[in-house]
Image: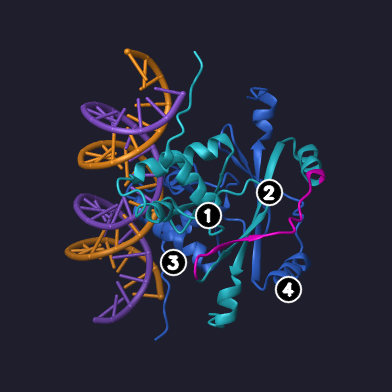
Chain colours: A cyan, B blue, C purple, D orange
Amino acid sequence: MERKEHFSRKRLAILEALKGTTCHPTADWVYGQLKPQYPDLSLGTVYRNLKRFCESGQAMSVGVIAGYERFDGNPAPHAHLVCRQCGAVVDVCGLPISMEELGKLSAMTGCQVESASITLKGLCAACVKDGKTA
Amino acid sequence: MERKEHFSRKRLAILEALKGTTCHPTADWVYGQLKPQYPDLSLGTVYRNLKRFCESGQAMSVGVIAGYERFDGNPAPHAHLVCRQCGAVVDVCGLPISMEELGKLSAMTGCQVESASITLKGLCAACVKDGKTA
DNA sequence: ATGTGTGCAAAGCTTTTGCATCATC
DNA sequence: GATGATGCAAAAGCTTTGCACACAT
């Protein structure tokens, strides 16, 4: 009993929308982005597919920020900065955690560390420029 | 107009419950923990106070894990490991990010990095021992 | 006394899910 | 023709909130 996957246009469109942006969108953002082109798109479908992508490794979740789950179509490990002012999530390169460190941690703690994610908090470049620092 | 804070017993109990555990509880866990001693405790009160503690810096949020927000009464910066099997959140010492690194990142990206949090995924020590590794 | 904290319960919100229908293989 | 995918809408579930009352100062 092989499991066949039907590659629907909408699924592909959702994946492309996700991979075509670096804004780490919410399900609703993807929905709004695709709705004009696919008027009969359903929000449930967006949720179903995003979840599917995360499980299959084609995408990942950045976590729940301000009540909304944020997704990331970039599979390469990298850090994120969450702007406390505008809520933007921006990629940050120069990940300072190595697999070596993870191995050390595993040995020290008795846990089995499989992956690490770094989340920074602060102000994004745009908000820094605005100078509206609270 | 100074703002007076009334230190109610329940508020103190909630804070103590949070600081007295390392399990990074949910609001519901705290509620269940205190309910026997405070039969008229309300879940809303737990939520209100946890939120308050986070805003005042007496506690922090570890984020939303499996649909529940997890809280941490330990103000010292440290990493967390989320067990993908049992959902436990355990503290991990030996934080490999320095303020120096954060400064570098700020300069490189134009952002203003204010704090960093590291979240590891894998198996907690207990689940490693059980050997039920999927 | 005054103003804050709480209980209760309803509302709010994102996300999930069931089922009939449609698309893909 | 089968089987997987989707639309629609209801359900689920955590969290928030309004209001009247109780408590701390």
Residue B7: assigned label:
3
**Crowdedness near tag 3: few (<14), some (14–19) or many (≥20) residues, C-alpha within 10 Å:** few
- Of all chains, the one bearing label 3 is B
Looking at the rendered structure, the kind of residue marked 1 is: Glu
Q: Between residues C18 and B90, which one lies in front from this camera angle?
A: C18
Q: Which residues are magenta?
A: A86-100
- Of all chains, the one bearing label 4 is B
Looking at the rendered structure, the kind of residue marked 4 is: Ala
- Which of discs 1 and 4 lies nearer the camera? The answer is 4
Give residue B24's position: percent from left, percent from top: 56, 47
Residue B123: assigned label:
none
Marks 2 and 1 belong to one chain: no
Badge 3 or badge 4: first in the primary sequence:
3
Q: Where A87 sits versus A27, above or below?
A: below
Give residue B5's position: percent from left, percent from top: 43, 72
- Which of discs 3 and 4 lies nearer the camera? The answer is 4
SS at circle 4: helix
Looking at the rendered structure, the kind of residue marked 2 is: Pro
Q: Which residue is mark 2?
A: A77
The quarter of the displayed image where residue D8 is located: top left
* Residues at marks 3 and 4, CA–CA distance in whole angstroms: 43 Å
Q: Which residue is mark 4?
A: B107
Residue at 46% across, 33% down: A7
- Of all chains, the one bearing label 2 is A
Quadrant where the N terminus of chain B is found in the figure = bottom left
> Is A21 in the magenta?
no
Residue B16: assigned label:
1
- Which of discs 2 and 3 lies nearer the camera? The answer is 2
**Crowdedness near tag 1: few (<14), some (14–19) or many (≥20) residues, C-alpha within 10 Å:** few
